[in-house]
Amino acid sequence: MSAETFYADLPSLENFLDITDFRNFVSVPQDWLIIVTDIAGSTKAIESGRYKDVNLIGAASIVAILNIAKNIDIPFVFGGDGATILIPPTLLSAVQGALLATRHLAKNEFDFDLRIGIVPGYVVIERHYDVKVAKVKISENYTQAVFTGGGLAYANDLVKNAATADIYRLHNVVGSSQADFSGLECRWQDIPSKHGEIVSLLVMAISDDLVEISSVYKDVLHIIKEIYGEEADLHPVSAESLNLSFNENKLFKEVNLRSQSGSWLARQIYLSKIKLENYLGAFLMGFKVKTRDTDWGNYKQNLIAATDYKKFDDMLRMVIAGNTLQSEKLTKSLDNLYKEGKLVYGLHISDRAIMTCLVFERNGRQVHFVDGADGGYALAAKAMKSRMKSGFY
């Protein structure tokens, strides 16, 4: 297989449970690069109510790189306040420029400090970590990357650790940089839980033995199914709860991202365009209109099928709809496994989810990033770090 088509050539797993069999993962070529982005101080920003802004900038670095990669299939994972993306070396120069433009946007439009790191794959390998990837077919329109081997976590540490940050962080360069954020949308209202709660969950198995690690994740997925039921029961997004937003303050977040170089008039025109598209979309979906390209009666179902509410990158990440009794049972079960030294976890509970969308084709390629409102994954990570510091393992 050629370097650029490495990921595209991988077979797709049909069942998410297959992520617990590490024989399904393949090492990424050593000359590929690990891109790490995150917002410095994101927890404080989230606690002050800016969780949507944080998610939007976290997704911006993904779409900026995907628009450079175009037909080159590359793996990525959205982490709420940032992302990890793997690229072949042929894309490096263009990606650097796009990431610098994304950092500039984050600062100028949102007053965020977007940290960006680039770690060569061979650096991770030399430190006896690995970056292994597989892909899971989530829907007809979205195939999701999953990772193991410890390499992504190590790359994140290299970028954030003061002792190594200067080596791997992307520094500003003289000259203009540009990024294309086409496809990035933020047009849906917050999504209320159909059962009362939205749980943002992070779980990381603690062991050096792959068989034990696999067993832990299988057990956790079994516990979640036992408590919350089938996918239709626990999925955080439902057609009934999906409503387009017409709130100008919320829609202006996309305006700031997509028209940052425009005048006041240009931004107002873009805002009017979004509102018009939302009114038209609401009409087409409401009356289940079929056009030449899109069956709008099924659009919400296609969207739901392409959400990333469960994923894996050396830890299990899930956003789950449930009730208080269920989250108490889940916490009790995870606490027992934590005290046995099998895993560490963090969770955050809200009453609704939020969604940031990458839509390249209305009737095709798209992915919808789901997080819990009011903090979601970022505050779950804060709880996990607290347990790690005072852990039983």
Image (cartoon, rainbow, N blue to C red):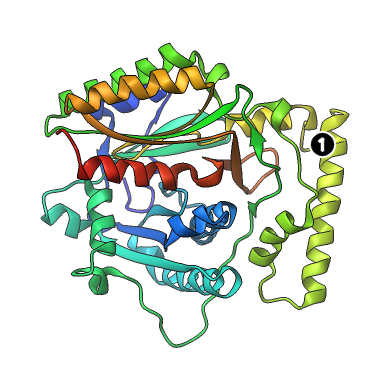
Q: Nearer the viewer, residue 371 or 312?
A: 371
For the question of whether residue 66 can be seen, the reply is no
Residue at the extreme bottom of the image, as rendered: 174
Q: Nearer the viewer, residue 20 or 216?
A: 216
Q: Quadrant of residue 15?
A: top left
Q: Is residue 325 above or below residue 174?
A: above
**Residue displayed at 42% across by 62% down:** 41
Q: Locate the N terminus by quadrant.
A: top left
Q: Nearer the viewer, residue 365 or 151?
A: 151
**Residue displayed at 18% across by 60% down:** 123
Q: Is residue 382 above or below residue 227?
A: below
Badge 1 density bin: few <14, some 14–19, many ≥20, Cα 10 Å: few
Q: Is residue 117 above or below residue 291?
A: below
- Say left or right for 304 vs 262: left
Residue 125 at x, y percent in the picture: 15, 52
Residue 32 at x, y percent in the picture: 29, 57
Q: Is residue 282 above or below residue 259?
A: above
Secondary structure under badge 1?
Answer: loop
Amino acid, disc 1: Arg
Q: Quadrant of residue 179?
A: bottom right
Q: Nearer the viewer, residue 10 or 148?
A: 148
Q: Which residue is mark 1?
A: 292
Residue 130 at x, y percent in the picture: 19, 46
Q: Locate the C terminus by quadrant.
A: top left
**Residue displayed at 33% across by 40% down:** 313
**Residue displayed at 21% across by 45% down:** 389
Residue 4 at x, y percent in the picture: 37, 53
Q: How many marks?
A: 1
For the question of whether residue 206 can be seen, the reply is yes
